[in-house]
Amino acid sequence: MKINFDNDRSIYLQLAESIEDDILKGIFAEEEQIPSTTQMSVQYRINPATAAKGVNLLVDEGIIYKKRGIGMFVSAGAKEKIINKRRQQFFDKFIISMLEEAKKLGIPKQELIKMIERGQINE
Amino acid sequence: MNKLFNIVAYKLKNMKKGIFILTLVMVLIAILTKITEISITLKSNTSTTTTSIFSGFELVAAIFLFIGIMASFKENFNHLSVNGITRKLFFKSEIVFIAAASLMLFILMLLLYVFYDFLEINTKFMLYSIYTSASPASFSVLFISLLLMASCVGLLFTVLSYRYGTPVILFLSLSPVLIFTIGPILVYRFHLSDIFIRFFSYYFGYVNNSARPLLASLNFIITSIVSCGISWIVIRRMPVKM
Amino acid sequence: MNKDHIIPLAENPSFSIQIKNISKKYGNVNALNDVSISIEDKKIYGLLGRNGAGKTTLLNILTNKIYPTSGEILINSKSIWENQDMQSQICYMTEKNLYPREMKVLDIFKSAQITYVNFDMDMALSLASYFKLNIKKKNKSLSKGFESILKIIVCLASNAPVVIMDEPVLGLDAAVRDEFYKMLLENYVQNPRTFIISTHLIEEISSLIEEAIILHKGRILVKKPVEKLLEEGYSATGKAENVDRYCEGRNVIHSETIGKFKNNTVLEPYEERDMEYALRLDIEIMPISLQKLFIHMTGGKSNE
């Protein structure tokens, strides 16, 4: 988990995202333990309270859970939860702005769909 | 009180080097004097008694303490303050340190006297030649109180220069010059000679044509206490030179 | 780094600090003007400010090295002035090197044990070896970087409940600075205590500190958790007329014009509807770093 934190964005959000990324990539499997907040705090040179905030965000979303006295674990179904969350974010971030841009350029819906298909063929 | 003990031990430890050099120098002087004496005696073929007399023990010790206390104050105060020692505790430790150091120097001078005597160098204590009727006990009290006074006055001078800076240092270093040039003029003009002579005689215990060691000791101790008192007033809320 | 040898504080008392109406005048100059803040226990604080803002003066007063013109400082409702019990709980890393010149590093460590009863000599020695500080070297022969390392080690090994550091990373190269931040956090997670760190390197320190205290011209400009502070501002970039329209009625603390484009720094939290409005005006909303926020809060319009 080598991360370079941006000073332009909330660090706890960046930490939460990077843990999610590792879960998606399979670095942390479901029911596997992740490093403690104190370990992450030292490793990434961030304040423990910030690390805790990032982890608590994931706990609130049901992606991570705490086992008292032992540590933090990846929840069952975490991968799916993350994918769903990211899909909504994908929609908000890319789809909406794509539609705005398309409107600006006067591209109709049919042509947009053709463009997507063209892009997928070129993969 | 553990802290107090540790701080005094720390200050005494810092003084070790100076004491070592002092002892070394005194011993070397003794040895050189002895060698000189022997070579003169050999050369002149007569058993001449040398006229050299070493009587500087008291002065050497007093000057050592006076300068030592002055020189070590700034570093000690800065160091201990940075380490969170309050001025109150620092001052207490300085008093205990002065007492301990004076006692140590007294014993050291006695030992050196014995050493000089052992080498058969003509030697004596200056205080004895002034206070001829002094018993060993009053001599000791006198010697120690002299050392205490030298230390306390040194403390006062250094504390004043630390707090008030260059003007004070200038004043203090020029004061002997001022005293010895302007002093006599004032004394002459205002016919102060009589008062001065009487005051200083009394201060050094000279009363009714006899030199009283205990009276002098008392005056030295009063001077020490007054110096310390003024020093405390200066140190009480003294800013650390950051 | 094992923590078996750290003696826990008796009954775990709190060391929150109340700084009340501290003012410091030098002749006609107000170095500090009615500074009142509350420092909570066991947090890492960053004390930030421009040169001459009064940071070192405040820290010197906080550690009883100099006296204020007025005001008081309390820990557990007791004044800290000349209070040896309290002074023994505070370890201060000064910007200058006030240790005796002829003293060896090891002896400086030993002397710290006089005040700091929980001083961890093992930790001090292992930190010294880690940072390659020769404990047999005399203080006067240390480079600026090693002077800082010496002072840092004394603070970390002191185990004092309150640690105050004035410009701790002076003279340290980037790699060593990173190591220091790591050591600091390790020390903090093992033994949570109050840290107050004053520094110019805002970018580097911003992720380590929990709360930022910004001092400007002798006054407290802001004291807030960094998270909250960052939520309080953003930059709006786009075509000048659009940006102006968007920023109508908003608290703009900085503005930059590059040709037809403008970049405004707004000191307000942004909300959902702001995002939509900005999108419509084709303005890009970006968060700003603590350093940029600091620069804009202490310069330009605020520089009155």
Image (spheres, helix red, strand yellow):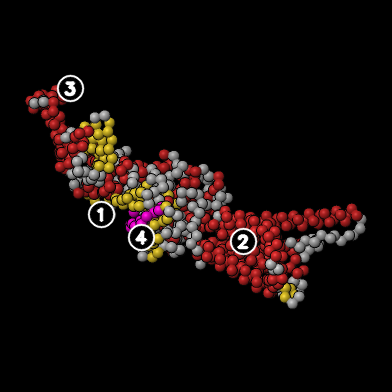
Q: Are marks 2 and 3 in contact (CB under 8 Å)?
A: no
Q: Dot 1: what SS?
A: loop
Which chain does tag 4 point to? C
Label 4, label 1: how far apart the Cα atoms are: 41 Å
Q: Which mark is residue A122?
A: 3
User: Which amino acid type corresponds to the residue marked 1 in the rendered image?
Assistant: Arg
Label 2, label 3: how far apart the Cα atoms are: 91 Å
- The answer to which of C213 and C158 lies nearer the viewer is C213
* Residue ID for mark 1: A68
Q: Which residues are magenta?
A: C30-47
Q: Is residue B93 left or right of residue C20?
A: right
Q: Is residue C209 above or below residue C278?
A: below
Q: Which mark is residue C20?
A: 4
Residue B85 coordinates in the image, percent (x, y): 49, 60
Nearer to us of marks 4 and 3 is 4
* Residue ID for mark 2: B154
Do the residues marked 1 and 2 share a common chain?
no
- The answer to which of A15 and C89 lies nearer the viewer is C89
- The answer to which of B240 and A85 lies nearer the viewer is B240
Q: Are marks 3 and 1 in contact (CB under 8 Å)?
A: no
Asked whether residue C61 is in view, the answer is yes
Label 4, label 3: how far apart the Cα atoms are: 68 Å
Nearer to us of marks 3 and 1 is 3
- The answer to which of C99 and B206 lies nearer the viewer is B206
Q: Is residue C231 above or below residue B35?
A: above
User: Which amino acid type corresponds to the residue marked 2 in the rendered image?
Assistant: Gly
Outermost residue toward the front in this view: B189
